[in-house]
Amino acid sequence: MPDGRVLYAGMSLLDRQLVDRSGRPCGNVDDCELEEGPTGALHVSAVLAGPGVLATRLGWRRLGPWLEWVGALVFPSPVDRPQRIPFSRVSDVGSAVHLAVDADELATMAGERWVRDHVIRHIPGNGHDAAE
Amino acid sequence: MKRALEITLGILTAIGGFVDIGDLVANAETGARFRMNLAWVVVVGVVGIVVYAEMAGRVASVSGRAVFDLVRERLGPGLGLLNLLASFFITALTLTAELAGVAIALSLAVSVHYLLLVPFTTFLVWIVVWRLPFETMERIFGLLGLALVVFVVTLWQVGPDWGSLLSEATHPHVPSQETPFTYAYYGIALFGAAMTPYEVFFFSSGAVEERWGRSDLNVNRANVFVGFPLGGVLSLALMAGAHLVLAPRGISVDSLSQVALPTAFVVGKLGLACLLVGIFAATFGAALETGLSAGYTVAQYLGWPWGKHVRPREAARFHLVVMVTLVGGLLVTLTGVDPIKVTEYSIVLSAAALPLTYFPILLIANDPGYMGDQVNGRLLNALAFVYLVILTVVAVATIPLMVITKAGQ
């Protein structure tokens, strides 16, 4: 991200598609984390993604943390808050929010990996490329 | 030939939307009950879907974002979720009816009870979703669906007085044996069938599946301007055929086999064979359209990887949603619910949710951040705004009319 570009997080960031380094969709910007800088101005320090985050933002204050707890139980992660993607990993903001990481490294994709490994992988033909 | 094949997405989308199992019966029923007095609604509906599908396809081509992505982005997560729940419910309901519809179409040919065929046809739908490339799928079912042109042939063979048919259609009134409420109810059903939201979900996602870009804007226009009017012509021909052939004989329409009667009377065996192929393709196409749309809407709302342009294991949750929806639809169908009633309800209910889908499309089509120089022109915006007003009025009137008329009785 070029320094100093002014973005209205509510308009340009929230609810946009997250896309990884190779262009694969990897969640939505479900919420943002704000941090106060030395001058007292707020800036976006991280984007947050995941059903728990979304539920909290929708005002379901019990369901949200519970969903995050269940998520951490089913998909254990070495990171403290796996829904958090530091803003330093964001490479561009356009009609989608581009990340400079691979979807496989993201904890927010744990659900996708679980379904892939436990359900889809067991069905014949799961790896065939329909585009060919 | 190659250029002609590029418009199969529009043809499949329109056939799956306009002449699927519920619409086949609803159109024939409307013709038998209201003659050509509701024909104008089909025209209004075709213009509406052309306006909004063109926008949705253009947004998908320029920005790579499909419709439900935009819904979430512009309506926010709360209203977006409400629309997701409503749209998913309607789409899954329609899918349920189409699964039965494919089986009924087959049962007309092989004389086996349709409930015995439903598990087989559901499995077929899943195999196509799982294995067949998107483009192949759209070509096979789009082209086979063209067999429904036999409706137009039927009308031609009847040899009606075209002038009086046209003047009846252009001077609409409420027939004496009907009330203004039933007239309005059937009008909404026809309008809702033309503008069912899963058409834009499927069409815009299809544009992304086929990797349309800025250079494909002409392809988008061709798809929209050929596909949807074709769907409208088929539905009008069916209506007129039922009016001319069934109404004088006092036959009312409430099942798929009666839809086939005018063609069977007038064109004969070959016509009937064409009709069965066409109905099979249209219902199967609609099952694919709704089944995939169920996956598209959920995946796009939540930002998951989706689509047939990647390997199934790279869009695992998307395929899981489609599978679960298919199994759910199969179970509901096996209870023996009347698939025609199910689609009629789902079409009318979808009319209540329409503005929540079409409003975000209009907003994004005007956003230079997404569209650059491809934003809407003034004339298009004026037309789109008129339709937004119509959609809102229809949405408000739908449920009360459903209650007053006891769903059109």
Image (tube, rainbow, N blue to C red):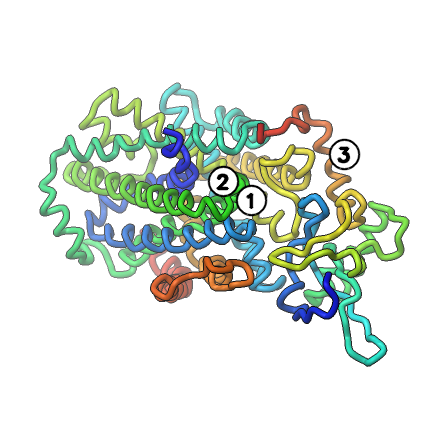
Q: CA distance from mark 1 to mark 3?
A: 22 Å
Query: Which amino acid type corresponds to the residue marked 3 in the rendered image?
Result: His
Instruction: Determine whether, in the image, residue B296 is placed left or right of residue B270.
Output: right
Residue B388 position by quadrant: bottom left
Residue at 47% across, 63% down: B366
- Front position in the image: B94 or B302: B302
Q: CA distance from mark 3 to mark 2?
A: 26 Å
Q: Chain of mark 3?
A: A
Question: Which residue corresponds to the image point at 63% horizontal and 65% vertical from the top-left?
Answer: A12
Q: CA distance from mark 1 to mark 2?
A: 9 Å
The reply, left or right, for residue B101 in relation to residue B333 is left
Q: Which amino acid lies under the numbered mark 1 shown in the image of this protein?
A: Ala
> Quadrant location of the C terminus of chain A?
top right
Q: Which mark is residue B95?
A: 2
Relative image position of residue B29 (x, y in whole percent): 28, 43
On the image, the x and y values in percent for residue B343 come to: 42, 44
Q: What's the mark number on residue A20?
A: none
Residue B16 x/y as whole percent: 41, 39
Horizontal relation, residue B369 to residue B225: left or right: right
Q: Which mark is residue A118?
A: 3
